[in-house]
């Protein structure tokens, strides 16, 4: 096995012999150099794993040497060593993409720590993360077995997402597979929990009911509105809790999270039902009853979310609230740029509602376009793609602009999505809804043991197009496929992200309140 080879450049290199002997005893191969010009030549001629570079040398300075090294090799990590603690020097070094920064006099163990942090970090992280998850494994299993309340499930889901993102940093795929098995076990238990308790959540006499979609504004958003501090409510369609954690990490240092919570989507976990419920403050059957002009039935071809602004206006009127507000739906980058040009105008409102549809568009594109499916093959890749969108989006530009104002920002979503794996046969007529995670119709044929069925939709405040209509919902990673041409569609839709059914990923949703760090 090849030894790790290190180049150490310092104009007082003779004084470093104890350090060099220490590192050689640890198994590292050390080359030394006393000036910048020779360092650049050595980098041209040899392959180094790491460079220690003195900042203050006669001739080429450390910063100048670093710039020339970068013209030859961009991949070698460089540790800058200096006597100076001047901030502008540190910033210049960091801006030149150094891997680490040490201030003289340095001790041998400091040097060893820097080497391990840079070159052994992946291995050390893997070992530490694997050990920690092994210790956590039994605790998560006990949490799954004991979960009996909505709060229990919210806390369990947070733990699972924490470990999912932690193990993503690890090079040990075995631990991720074990976690996936635990997550699958949890989703099966969660599905049973929802099936047992869902109808009871609409009884206000029961304690422990979760916050559901129709109450999001009244319980969580309206209380955040104040006369002297504009509120921006950003709803990212089809965003999961783990995807929110990816986005929030990019906002660190610009915003602080002052509240973070999980709320529950109603069923079906689809835009037509959950988002209309959010903006109206009503369950779907009540919308259809009180405002039929704003409700589009499942079997109709027209858009299902064309009246969110009208539904929100009606909610304000019912509650007697007289806010100055705006509503905007952002589907494309030009839409976002136009909103950003109006920031000064929006600041004058009490609340601004911004619906971003990118994640939902990405989810549908992933199903239909092979290239997108390859780019977002699994959950970590999907999160990476969403992160890439966010940091280059008009939304991120807007967040950076808003950070200079005394605002509050709320992030949330209407439902999540799950990567489906298991086809379940169902038979329906032409009037049956097309969604793969739920079906609504009057002539449904299915195995009742494989789905959650609502024979009386009125009990769940769901509208029906016929007196005998009922709803069925897929659970965990199942998806509903018609018997005709079953094998083709089962193969086509397997491993796609879908929503509408029962899973932690679809139902347990992020809600976060942020404020600018500097305000």
Image (cartoon, grey):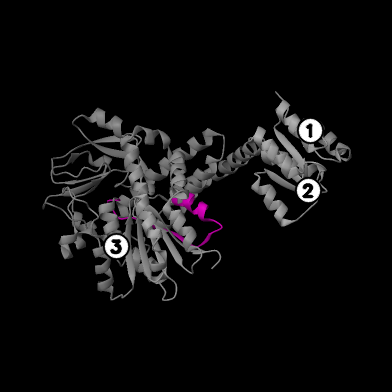
Q: CA distance from mark 3 to mark 1?
A: 67 Å
Which mark, by number, is residue 38? 1
Q: Which corner quadrant holds the C terminus?
A: bottom right
Give above or below for 267 relative to 418.
Answer: below
Q: Does the rendering let one see residue 46?
A: no
Which circle's residue, 2 or 3, is located before the other in the chain? Answer: 2
Nearest-to-viewer mark from 3 and 1: 1
Mark 2 sits on what residue? 82
Q: Position of residue 441 (x, y in %)?
A: 16, 46
Nearest-to-viewer mark from 2 and 3: 2
In the shown orientation, is residue 423 left or right of residue 17?
Answer: left
Mark 3 sits on what residue? 279
Q: Position of residue 210 (x, y in %)?
A: 36, 60
Nearest-to-viewer mark from 2 and 1: 1
Q: CA distance from mark 2 to mark 1?
A: 19 Å
Q: Residues within 10 Å of mark 2 (few under 14, many from 20)?
A: many
User: For the point 36% across and 57% down, which residue is it?
Assistant: 338
Q: Where is residue 410, by image quadrant?
A: bottom left
Residue at the front extreme? 59
Q: Where is residue 207, by image quadrant?
A: bottom left
Q: Which residues are magenta?
A: 244-269
Q: Where is residue 73, by image quadrant?
A: top right
Q: Could you tell me which secondary element the residue under label 3 belongs to?
A: helix
């Amino acid at each position: 096995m090849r030894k790790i080879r290190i180049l150490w450049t310092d104009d007082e290199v003779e004084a470093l012999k104890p350090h060099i002997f220490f590192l050689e005893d640890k198994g590292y191969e050390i080359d030394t150099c006393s000036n910048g010009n020779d360092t650049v030549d050595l980098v041209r001629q040899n392959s180094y794993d790491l460079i220690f570079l003195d900042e203050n040398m006669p001739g080429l300075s450390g910063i100048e040497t670093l710039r020339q090294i970068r013209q030859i090799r961009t991949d070698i990590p460089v540790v800058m060593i200096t006597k100076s603690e001047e901030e502008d020097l540190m910033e210049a070094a960091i801006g030149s993409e150094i891997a680490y920064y040490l201030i003289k006099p340095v001790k041998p163990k400091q040097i060893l720590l820097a080497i391990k942090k840079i070159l052994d970090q992946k291995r050390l992280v893997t070992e530490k993360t694997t050990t920690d998850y092994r210790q956590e494994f039994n605790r998560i299993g006990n949490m799954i077995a004991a979960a009996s309340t909505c709060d229990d499930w919210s806390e369990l889901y947070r733990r699972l997402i924490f470990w999912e993102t932690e193990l993503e940093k690890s090079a040990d795929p075995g631990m991720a597979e074990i976690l996936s098995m635990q997550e699958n076990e949890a989703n099966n238990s969660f599905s049973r929990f929802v099936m047992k308790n869902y109808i009871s959540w609409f009884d206000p006499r029961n304690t422990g009911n979760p916050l559901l979609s129709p109450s999001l504004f009244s319980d969580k958003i309206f209380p955040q509105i104040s006369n002297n501090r504009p509120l921006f409510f950003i709803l990212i369609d089809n965003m999961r809790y783990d995807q929110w954690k990816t986005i929030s990490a990019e906002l660190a240092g610009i915003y602080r999270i002052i509240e973070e919570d999980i709320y529950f989507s109603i069923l079906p976990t689809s835009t037509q039902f959950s988002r209309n419920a959010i903006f109206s403050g009503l369950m779907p059957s009540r919308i259809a009853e009180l405002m039929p002009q704003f409700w589009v039935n499942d079997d109709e071809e027209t858009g299902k979310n064309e009246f969110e602004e009208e539904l929100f206006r009606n909610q304000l009127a019912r509650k007697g609230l007289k806010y100055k507000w705006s509503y905007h739906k952002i589907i494309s980058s030009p839409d976002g740029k136009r909103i950003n040009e109006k920031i000064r105008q929006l600041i004058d409102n009490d609340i601004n509602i911004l619906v971003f549809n990118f994640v939902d568009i990405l989810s549908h594109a992933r199903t239909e376009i092979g290239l997108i499916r390859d780019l977002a093959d699994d959950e970590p890749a999907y999160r990476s793609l969403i992160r890439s969108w966010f940091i280059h989006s008009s939304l991120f530009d807007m967040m950076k602009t808003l950070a200079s104002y005394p605002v509050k920002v709320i992030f949330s979503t209407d439902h999540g999505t799950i990567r489906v794996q298991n086809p379940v046969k169902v038979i329906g007529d032409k009037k049956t809804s097309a969604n793969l995670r739920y079906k609504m119709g009057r002539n449904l044929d299915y195995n009742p043991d494989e789905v959650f069925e609502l024979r009386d939709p009125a009990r769940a405040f769901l509208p029906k197009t016929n007196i005998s209509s009922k709803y069925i919902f897929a659970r965990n990673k199942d998806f509903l496929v018609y018997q005709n041409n079953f094998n083709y569609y089962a193969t086509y839709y397997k491993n796609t992200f879908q929503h509408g059914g029962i899973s932690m990923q679809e139902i347990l949703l992020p809600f976060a309140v942020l404020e600018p760090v500097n305000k």
